[in-house]
Amino acid sequence: MGNNANENYAIEMKNITLSFNKKIANDNVTLRLRKGEVHALLGENGAGKSTLMNVLFGLYKADSGEIYVNGKKEVIDNAVTANKLGIGMVHQHFKLVHNFTILENIVLGVEETHLGLLKLADARKRVVELCNKYHFDLDPDAKIEDITVGMQQRTEILKMLFRNNDIMIFDEPTAVLTPQEIREFMTIVKNLKAEGKSILFISHKLDEIKEVADRCTILRKGKCIATVDVDKVSKEELSEMMVGRKVNLKVDKAPAKPGNVVLEVRHLSVAGERGHKDKVRDVSFDVRAGEIVCIAGIDGNGQSELIKGITGTKPLKSGTIKIDGQDFTHKSIRYKNTHGISHIPEDRHRDGLILDYDMEKNMVLQEYFEKRFSHSGFLKEKEIAEYTDELIDEYDIRSMAGGTSIVRNMSGGNQQKIIIAREMTKEHKLMIAVQPTRGLDVGAIEYIHKSIVKQRDMGIGVLLVSFELEEVMNLADRILVMFEGEIVAEFTDIQNLDLNELGLYMAGGKRMNMKEVA
């Protein structure tokens, strides 16, 4: 028994302090996880939540402070030690080997071998038993690269169950899931709790915390603000503790005043993978200056391919695209970037940033060759640094080393803010935003929603793709519903729109005759 430790706690982290380059990430934080509870860790992007969990999991070493596991003081210096103590972690960006099977990923690091050969029969039996017990519909022989994000997450959960981890850390577990997968994940968490697992749940989605968490510890700028019983506080109180001020979760906006057509899409089709049916089929629509047109639908119904077709990152099978009446169908990506299209992409890591560059270079990725940022083939470093500093202030981008921070080392929310700052600041007529607030906290979401409405009110045409129904209803002036690659409905009276009705169209249960709408 360690000094002053309580055996009713699965985890006690006492007075944890950790700095990077003299910037404090965790400032004297104390967190106590009771046995058999779901304990949420709430905070803005960059508040120090993931850092604290990485200390508990042995990936970072705290400058000071103590950790007790089941009442006993421990030194956790790597993930193997954490696992031996019964601690498992599912990271926001999964740690899976993509060309391995589900089964191979689960046994990785705890393999049984005989004469140098892998013994998988017993492991397979156990994995199948766990899948049946938790209603995971997984094929142990499927490769990670061939399965959905939701299935990859279940693979990560199976890794913890396979290792008999009783203490489970989930870092932003729903950031990459569809609404359906989120509902299924919440059920999984409730089942794990019912079995007596102790769960730390990092999130900034207040609805989810209210649904599954017993208690919640709030971090703000590295400090612990409070630990509260979730059923005794409102969402508004939680968000105020998290951000330090009142947050308006509803978007205030005047009615749209649509102007000329900015984007004209006609009969657009995009091919599917390897001979499968087309991902986008004969899609036509317009976006006008000064309006927000939102494409709603369940993820995987051709929204991504439609946007890639318009922005030029995926070839078109047929159809035409015009911006301000000019044919853009076969223009290069650079031409589109410099002649009126701004684009916040769905996958910020793959399509939005160069992760090993610093923030300054990422801010001018599409404009570094312009006169203001280069001269005779040389970059104007001072001008780029000043421009980046302005955007850091305006968009409240938090990082350890300002404009010289390497983007890979920044939190997901702050990476997203870099893209938003870059795309909203450069000259454009059309703003295409795909999941612009994915993985962001309420303070950042409020800011980005206001920024999108401001773009609209400046006469920019906005094409928004979102899988968050609340976001769609909050921002859209007009909603187009996509199902299996086609636009199946259009709604203009958003105020009186019935969500169940919208859901029916999204699930393919109903469709309008779009020729009559047009």
Image: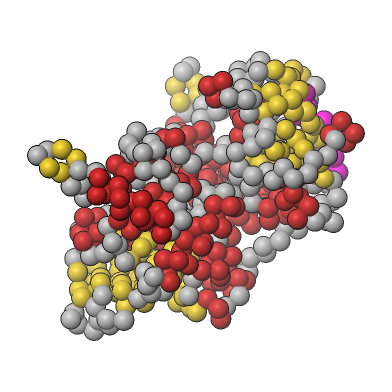
For the point 50% across and 21% down, the residue is 375
Res 83 → quadrant: bottom left
The residue most toward the left is 115
Picture coordinates of residue 75 (x, y %)?
Answer: 19, 65
Q: Quadrant of the C terminus?
A: top right
For the point 45% across and 66% down, the residue is 191
- Is residue 313 something one can see in this rendering? yes
Labels in figure, total: 0
Picture coordinates of residue 322 (x, y %)?
Answer: 75, 22
**Residue 4 as seen in the image, left or right of residue 383:** left
- In the rendered view, would you say 62 is above or below 503? below
Picture coordinates of residue 216 (x, y %)?
Answer: 47, 72
Q: Quadrant of the N terminus?
A: bottom left
Picture coordinates of residue 193 (x, y %)?
Answer: 42, 70
**Residue 517 as seen in the image, left or right of residue 11:** right
- In the rendered view, would you say 284 is above or below 224? above
Magenta: main secondary structure equals strand
**Residue 261 as seen in the image, left or right of residue 414:** right
The residue most toward the right is 516
- Is residue 457 something one can see in this rendering? no
For the point 66% across and 15% down, the residue is 330
- In the rendered view, would you say 495 is above or below 355? below
> For residue 261: magenta?
yes
225 and 228: which one is in front? 228
> For residue 105: magenta?
no
Which residues lie in the magenta part? 257-266
Q: How is the image coloured?
A: secondary structure
For the point 67% across and 62% down, the residue is 249
